[in-house]
């Protein structure tokens, strides 16, 4: 079973404006995992050679369980570094945000195609027709981001395994 974060990293490797090199020692690291939106500036600040654009996946998740289905929400960030580091230059801010939106749209188009054509992604069923998004930035003066929330639907068909539990007679000892 493929994790959604691995699919995002695959996109970052194949997407020409990023051409992410995997592994911790990758010389063109463009894909990042982080806890939540608050930790983005800390990650980017520790990587002064981080190039724009890049993409991140938030490890913290929300979701719901209903009718035998688990519905996690995946949060993906598309980050762009503005041409200058003057956060008050609103034209530069606008252009950086528009660029992040463009990368987001290209990712959504790619993920739609992947879900339709790749059988190994059968466990990934992200909703790409109704997506919530929001912008974020500037952070570290000249980075801007847009994040999207993608809902996934997974069948919840795990049965009780008696080996996972203590039998009544074991607890009475």
Image (cartoon, rainbow, N blue to C red):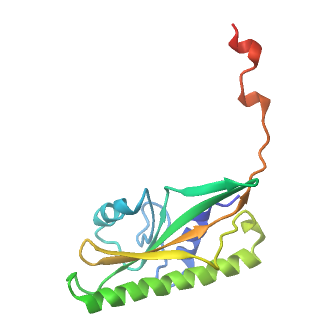
In this view of the protein, which residue sits in the foreground, 166 or 71? 71
Taking the spot 55% from the left edge, 85% from the top edge, the residue there is: 106
In this view of the protein, which residue sits in the foreground, 133 or 3? 133
In this view of the protein, which residue sits in the foreground, 25 or 155? 155
Residue 130, given in percent of the width and then of the height, sits at 61, 77
In this view of the protein, which residue sits in the foreground, 28 or 6? 6
Instruction: Answer above or below: position of 67 versus 12.
Output: above
Task: Indicate left or right for 135 with 3 as reference.
Answer: left
Location of the C terminus by quadrant is: top right
Tell me where residue 27 sits by quadrant.
Answer: bottom left
Residue 142, given in percent of the width and then of the height, sits at 27, 78
Instruction: Answer above or below: position of 67 versus 4.
Output: above
Location of the N terminus by quadrant is: bottom right
Taking the spot 70% from the left edge, 55% from the top edge, the residue there is: 66
Taking the spot 22% from the left edge, 88% from the top edge, the residue there is: 89
Taking the spot 59% from the left edge, 57% from the top edge, the residue there is: 63
Residue 95, given in percent of the width and then of the height, sits at 35, 90
Q: Residue furthest front?
A: 67
Query: Across the whole image, how many numbered discs are drawn on residues?
Result: 0
Task: Indicate left or right for 16 with 34 as reference.
Answer: right
Instruction: Answer above or below: position of 44 versus 96.
Output: above
Residue 59, given in percent of the width and then of the height, sits at 49, 57
């Amino acid at each position: 079973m493929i994790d959604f974060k691995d699919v995002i990293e695959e996109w970052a490797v194949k997407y020409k404006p990023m051409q992410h090199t995997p592994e911790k020692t990758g010389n063109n690291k463009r894909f990042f995992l982080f806890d939540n939106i608050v930790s983005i500036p800390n990650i980017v600040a520790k990587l002064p050679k981080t190039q724009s654009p890049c993409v991140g996946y938030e490890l913290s998740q929300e979701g719901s369980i209903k009718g035998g289905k688990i519905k996690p929400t995946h949060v993906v960030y598309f980050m762009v570094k503005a041409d200058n580091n003057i956060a008050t230059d609103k034209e530069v801010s606008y252009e950086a945000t528009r660029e992040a939106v463009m990368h987001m749209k290209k990712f959504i188009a790619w993920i739609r195609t992947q879900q339709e054509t790749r059988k190994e992604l059968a466990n990934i069923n992200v909703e790409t027709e109704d997506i919530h998004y929001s912008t974020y930035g500037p952070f570290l003066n000249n980075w801007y981001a847009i994040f999207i929330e993608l809902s996934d639907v997974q069948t919840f068909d795990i049965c009780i395994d008696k080996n996972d539990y203590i039998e009544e007679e074991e607890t009475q000892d």
